[in-house]
Image (cartoon, rainbow, N blue to C red):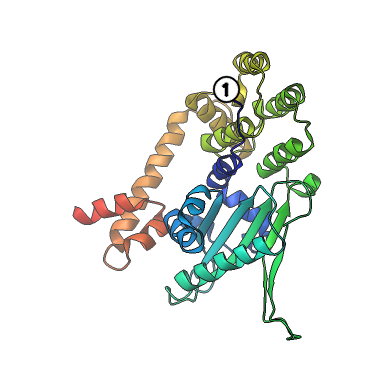
Amino acid sequence: MSNKHDYDAAWKTILEAFEVEVVEVLFPEIFDEIAWELGTESLDLELQEIQREIFDKDSAEKIISDKIIKVRLKDNNSKILFIHVEVQSYSSDEDAFGERMFRYFYRIWDKFRYKNKDKSEVIAAAIYTYKGYRGKDKKYVYKVPKLKEEILVYNFRTIDVEKIDLENTSADNPLKLVFKMAKTLLVTKPKDEDIYKAKIQLAEELVEYNKVKNEEQIKALADFLEYLFLIEDRELKQKFEEYKRERGGAVRMTVDQIRQKYYEQKGKEIGIEEGIQKGIEKGIQEGEYKKAIEVARNLLDVLDDETIALKTGLNIDEIKKLRLN
């Protein structure tokens, strides 16, 4: 049985691990206006509800490479912003995808816009990962026959992996490597020998890659490479497994190895002298956690659990435990 590309699963790992980086690439002009210190929230359950409203049951269950990210803006009393991102890996009929994006938009608008007193904002973007021009809409236009004016025009941001200029993507953003992998797949011939060569070249970059923030991100990159470049030939598949064992690095790192690499890199970036014990870092982290607990206790009587979690970086379960004590 031949392997089958699971593009949705591949891109889902990227959207999960690189929320902040995705927003930076898609909406650079508002990136610095977002209060990232208050954290982000992934509305996966709410997204599933919207998908069930738009699509039939079977189709809704298959769509997993979408994401709604909830953040807060720095001004306007921490106004809420909802960011919808969808990855499209196949072409559709003319205007079909644009209309689909609009349907998502008005469902999100209805569900969240007036739920909060601040009249939350909603923006959206699509990432096209396939060849050709068909179905790569940038807007949805609704018109009624015989009426000259357009009733509605809905615009959304897009990135076309096939056409993207990697030079315009910051070298410090891991999505540059993600887009390079995806773009390489589009130009690689569907022969195992070519797939193997391309996979080795990208794996070499991944072995020494140091632009990630944590082990989840490096694992997402390694998984992304595996998902996209599937090798059918048993000998070549075994050869790549041997390469991973021999080469090591990010393509075959344990969690402890990844964590060590992460701390070493972050230490160099902020100018910490080599040789500082990890126990100091751990002590700092523990001190910050205790401070967050103290702040949360002071807010229990004035704010709800969700807001306290955003303000302190604690999770909802930790807030609930504080209320019980």
Q: Nearer the viewer, residue 260 or 229?
A: 229
The residue that appears at 60% across and 29% down in the rendered structure is 3
Amino acid carrying mark 1 in the image: Arg
**Image position of 230 with respect to 170: above or below:** above
* Image position, residue 233 (x, y; %): 67, 18
Q: Is residue 32 visible?
A: no
Q: Nearer the viewer, residue 79 or 147?
A: 147
Q: Secondary structure at mark 1?
A: helix
Q: Is residue 61 visible?
A: yes
Q: Residues within 10 Å of mark 1 (few under 14, many from 20)?
A: some
Q: Say which quarter of the image contains residue 308.
A: bottom left
The residue that appears at 58% across and 51% down in the rendered structure is 20
Quarter containing the N terminus? top right
Q: Nearer the viewer, residue 62 or 178?
A: 62
Q: Is residue 308 left or right of residue 145?
A: left
**Image position of 128 with respect to 239: above or below:** below
Label 1 sits on residue:
252
Q: Is residue 142 left or right of residue 51?
A: right
The residue that appears at 30% across and 68% down in the rendered structure is 302
The residue that appears at 75% across and 27% down in the rendered structure is 198
* Image position, residue 191 (x, y; %): 75, 26
Q: Is residue 94 left or right of residue 109?
A: right
* Image position, residue 252 (x, y; %): 57, 22
Q: Nearer the viewer, residue 8 or 123?
A: 8
